[in-house]
Image (tube, rainbow, N blue to C red):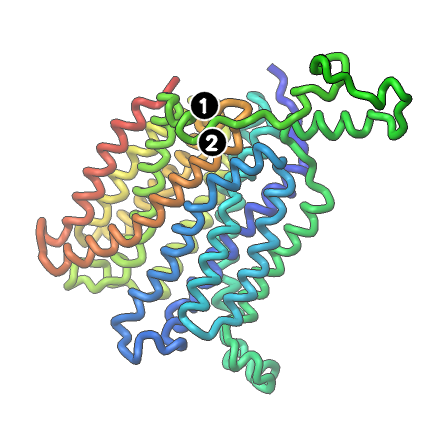
Amino acid sequence: METTPLPKFQVFLTLLIQLSEPVTGMVIYPFITRAVKRTGITEGDEKRTGYYAGVIESVFFISESLSVYYWGRASDFYGRKPILVIGPLGLSLAMLSFGLSQSFWGMVISRAAMGVFNGNIGVSKTVMAEYTDETNRADAFTLMPLVWTIGATMGPALGGVLAAPATRWPHVFGKLAFFTDYPWFLSCSAAGLLAFIAFALSSWGLKETLPSKIKQNKTSESTPLLLNDSEARPSYGSLPDSSESGIGSSCSPEAAPSARALLGDSKLRITLISMGFLAFTDMSYQVLIPLIYSTSISAGGLGLSPYQVGLILGIFMFANGVWNWIVLTPILKKFGPRKTVIVTYTFFLSAFRAFMGVTPLVWAILILQLFVSSVIITAFNAMHLLVVMNAPRNALGSVNGLAQMVSSGTRGLAPVFSSSLFSISLESRIAGGHLVEIVLMGITVVGIYCISRLPH
């Protein structure tokens, strides 16, 4: 079967909107601890900083999970484009608000707004599915993790380099009291500018993909502005046939099934449950990496310096980009999304096992773990394809919204669960201090069982 060419400019605009998510979401990571301390909420107790920083991080995922389904459902009725382009506009404003916040609760509200406007990310996956068919869908979907990797690298870089410019470049910014009073504004405004560029370009060039809206627009363009008397008076005796008038029910947005009706589909239900396990285990793993890498050897960690941790994570991001660019598409085409998810998800067992214990071969284990991590990324792309494949055509936006809600909700729970369990493991020394790894490996086994039941 011949591969259908991708609509390159439309795919580019959709990916540009997606790029805004990791950049705006991660730009605060390098300075969030200092930002929390600066608000005075900790009252000088440095040990409380992590708790308040965690609140700011969690509220992002919570607000995203609460809004994402409604964005998807709205896109099924109002069209994909208006719902999709409002996201980066809201993100740009929320980023400016965060940069201007000097109180803890101001940061929380701004961060919650970021989550709400990031909630329409599920719509971008819907649009990507509607741009493509069976011959080129894998090619398009493998671009999404590459863009996420680029954004995940750009965000912290902007946050780290541009934070506190009055201190970093005193000859340029030190003379301006504004940057002394608002040290995080430059980092936030840079991320906000990227989001605004995505809004401006997509508002101009993005095309509508919702079938009912496309038909409606074509009908509006073809209907004469002036009708004769017989055409101007509608017949109330019967509804016009859609094939004759072109304005019947086919042109109206088809009512999408409710969430309860969608969840009644067993195939879709097990797909969403599998998505939840994948998102939860991945987020737990991502939370444990900096905790275990930086914790002292005597306490059960690896005792790595911040520079070493940064170097490892930088290599990890680069490896992910290379993997997704070169290897991912052939794997999806050869094995299909179901087999790809099942096989790659099992790699979490090796990833969590690699955390347990420090040996002279620690660097070899880290390299193996990074390789395993890159393989795991493949599961997300395959899972997104499975969501699209099991969604009713008239509810594609709603289903993607449900999937994103499940993903965001479990990602919001994972940091609190895994970091708290890590602390309990170190304090209680249960299983030699490896309770957290054992529990997460057990959760992974349950996830493997659920994922093995994915529909063919």
Q: In this view, does 200 lie above or below 41?
A: above
Question: Is residue 156 in view?
Answer: no
The residue positioned 33% from the left and 66% from the top of the image is: 52
In depth, the one of 433 and 209 nearer the eye is 209
Quarter of the picture containing the N terminus is top right
Examine the image and state in which quarter residue 15 appears: top right
Percent x, y of residue 409: 36, 44
The residue positioned 73% from the left and 17% from the top of the image is: 236
Examine the image and state in which quarter residue 260 appears: top left
In depth, the one of 261 and 349 nearer the eye is 261
Q: In this view, does 95 lie above or below 118?
A: below
In depth, the one of 93 and 260 nearer the eye is 260
Mark 1, residue position: 390
Which residue is situated farthest in the front direction here? 237
Examine the image and state in which quarter residue 446 appears: top left
Residue neighbourhood size for the residue with mark 1, other residues' Cα within 10 Å, grouped as few (<14), some (14–19), many (≥20): some
Question: Is residue 134 in view?
Answer: yes
Does residue 246 appear to the left or right of 255 in the view shown?
A: right
The residue positioned 46% from the left and 49% from the top of the image is: 318
Q: How many marks do you count on the picture?
A: 2
Q: Is residue 210 above or below residue 413?
A: above
As shown in the figure, which amino acid type bears the numbered disc 2? Val
Mark 2, residue position: 399
As shown in the figure, which amino acid type bears the numbered disc 1? Asn
Label 2 SS: helix
The answer to whether the residue labelled 2 contacts the one labelled 1, judged by CB atoms less than 8 Å apart, is yes
The residue positioned 45% from the left and 29% from the top of the image is: 258
Quarter of the picture containing the C terminus is top left
